[in-house]
Amino acid sequence: MECYNQQLPECSAGLPNLAALGGGMVYDSTITSGDTATKPGWAQIFSGYNAEVLGIYSNGDYQPIPEGYTVFEKLENNFGDENIVTMFISGKSIHTGAACVGDSTYENGQPVTEDQGQPWCLTKDHLDYYENDLRQNLVVGNRALELLETHQNDLFFASFIFRVPDVIGHIGGENSSQYTQAIVGDDIWLGNIVDKLVELGIDDRTLIYVTTDHGFDEDGNTHGNAPYTFLVTNDPLVVREGDRKDIAPTILERYGISLGPLGNAPAVDGFSLYSFPAFECVPEGQAFIDYEGAPACCSGLSLISLDRAFNRNLFTYATGGTGDNSGYCTACGDGICTEPENFLNCSADCN
Ligand SMILES: [Zn+2]
């Protein structure tokens, strides 16, 4: 936001392509289920389920996304394989990986045999394009432009994941000039993609959603608990801020696909951003998302911050999110659950 708001020397022009896409509107997208990390992040963004439903909690505790749970598969099933092109093009490596149990992969640069099953193990076979570990923005970006050109006359749903700001943030830190420059670099690629759509004459019928799987710890070089992220879109039907798990339901609704059970997949956990949630108040154990018009905690419950919920082993403060009171509705008062992983059943475990 500092960069977007032209508060940094590297961003004297802000992030012009992002600002143009959203017409100056930036929505909060807050993380309330699953770690603020890559494996749980993209799995949730493209499915709309809680971490417990996906079985993907963190970069170290995960399994394949169950078959049929992703937006990609629901689109393929809805329109028929021949009638829609789905693409998952990622600069990330193992955390958007598709190695199944027993497959060769690597860890810290060393070859290992996968023992849990990476998130995209089952989904990859249902995609028209699954390309991972492209690394540099130039490679991801040029592949995006090429695929858009190839499929300019097709109905498509494409995701292009740019990895570079995260890498630079881990090296130089969140307040480094390099991190800011890397974010500007992503904005330039957004501009290149929009320019390509204009050149192809399909910009007026292509919806774009720009988001991220997690934030970054303020002044840190990790994202241990960085739940405050953003969504910028040219989709005019989006009316509110929301949760990381609300993006998939929004896309499903846009394509006219049910948010309820489909095949072996249960109803999604998130809510479409096209309307305000139908419930009057937030029940115990659920997240309150702080935006204008959001339902508050039900009576008798109190609101606790996002400080403690994600990392299942450690108490971790949430960083960033200035002025954002998002949190969880609990019967525990201000007490802290003795076992963070039992958070959703906290009332049995208050102290
Ligand atoms: Zn990272």
Image: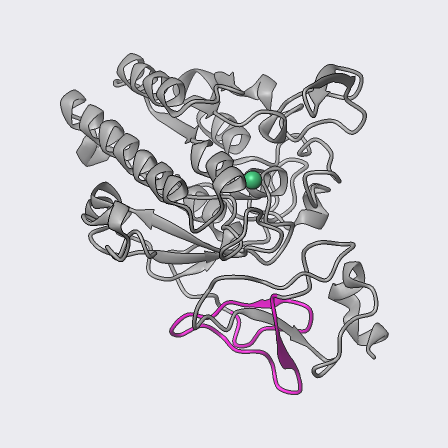
Verify whether residue 281 appears in magenta. Answer: yes
User: From this viewpoint, is residue 50 visible?
Assistant: yes
In the visual, does 213 lie left or right of 342?
Answer: left
* Residue at 68% from the left image edge and 64% from the top image edge: 308
Residue 35 in the image: above or below residue 81: below
Residue 215: x percent and y percent?
Answer: 49, 50
**Most common SS among magenta residues:** loop
Residue 192: x percent and y percent?
Answer: 23, 28
Tell me where the magenta segment starts and ends, as one range: 279-306
Q: Quadrant of ligand 1?
A: top right
User: From this viewpoint, is residue 14 visible?
Assistant: no
* Residue at 75% from the left image edge and 15% from the top image edge: 103
Residue 126: x percent and y percent?
Answer: 56, 20
Quadrant location, the N terminus? bottom left
Residue 218 in the image: above or below residue 52: below
Q: Nearer the viewer, residue 14 or 254?
A: 14
Residue 331 in the image: above or below residue 98: below
In the visual, does 316 lie left or right of 159?
Answer: right
Verify whether residue 256 appears in magenta. Answer: no
Q: Splitting the image into 4 quarters, where does residue 226 fall?
A: bottom right
Quadrant location, the C terminus? bottom right
Q: How is the image coloured?
A: one colour
Q: Nearer the viewer, residue 11 or 265?
A: 11
* Residue at 63% from the left image edge and 64% from the top image edge: 317
Residue 37: x percent and y percent?
Answer: 60, 44
